[in-house]
Amino acid sequence: MQLIVEKTNAYARKLPTWVVYLIGVLPAPWFVYLGATGGLGFEPIKALEHELGELALQLLVAGLAITPLRRHLGINLIKFRRALGLLAFFYVFLHLLVWAVLDVQLLSQIWADILKRPYITVGMLGFALLIPLAVTSNNWSVRRLGPKWRKLHKLTYVAVLLGGVHYLMLVKGWQIEPMIYLAVIATLLTMRVKFPSIRHA
C-alpha cells in the first residue's frame, strides 16, 4: 500500500495542472457532438442536461475527496483541487445553460420553475454558492482575503450536498444511483471531521 501511495504522489507531482484542465473540458464538446448526431437518444436536450449535471457532481465529489485521501491514506492531490472545483463550476454552468436556453427557453417560465419546483430551487441555490468560490479561486483572492478565504470556501461542502439532494429530488421514484452519490458525499464530509482524541487516565 505504501508503495502505491508513493508512486501516486510521484506521478501527481510530475503531472502539470493544465493537463487536468485540458482533459476536464474534453467531455463538453463530445456531449454536444453526441446530441447533434443522435447519440443521446430521443430526448437529446434532457440527456445533455443529465450528462453535464452528473459530471459536475462527480467533479465536486472528487474535489471533496482530496483532503480525506491525504489525511487517511497519505495520497496528496491537493494541487488539483482548484482545477476540479473550476471544472465542476464550468459543467454546472453548462448544465444550467442547457436547461434555461434549450429546454425551458422562456425567461418567465425559468423564474417560475425556480420558485415552484423544489429540486430546481435546491439546484439553483447550490449554483449560487459556487459562484463566489469560482470567482475567488485564484492566488490574488487567496492573498487578498487571507484567513477569510478558507472560511468562504467551506461553502463547497454545502454546495456539493445540495447538488446531491438536487439529483435525488430530480429522479422519479427511488433510484439507487443518486442515493449512492449522497452516501458518498455524506461519508466524505464525515471523514473531514476531526474528532477529539480520547485520553486515557
Image: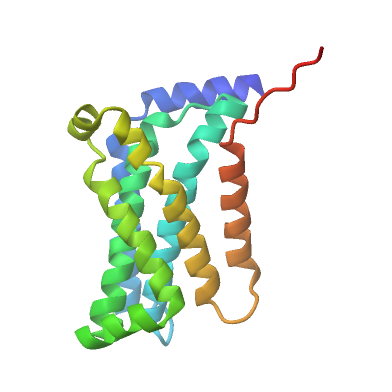
Q: Residue at x 27, y 37 (%)?
A: 18
Q: From what the image shows, is residue 63 above or below residue 185? A: above
Q: From this viewpoint, is residue 26 visible?
A: no
Q: From what the image shows, is residue 122 above or below residue 189? A: below
Q: From this viewpoint, is residue 136 visible?
A: yes
- Relative depth, front residue between 103 and 108: 108
Residue 101 in the image, given as x and y percentages of width and height: 23, 79
Q: From what the image shows, is residue 144 above or below residue 87? A: above
Residue 82 in the image, given as x and y percentages of width and height: 33, 39
Q: Quick check: 173 left or right of 60?
A: right
In which quarter of the view is residue 191 placed? top right
Q: Quick check: 92 left or right of 54?
A: left
Q: Quick check: 80 left or right of 193?
A: left
Q: From what the image shows, is residue 54 above or below residue 137? A: below
Q: Residue at x 42, y 81 (%)?
A: 117
In which quarter of the view is residue 39 placed? bottom left
Residue 14 in the image, given as x and y percentages of width and height: 37, 24
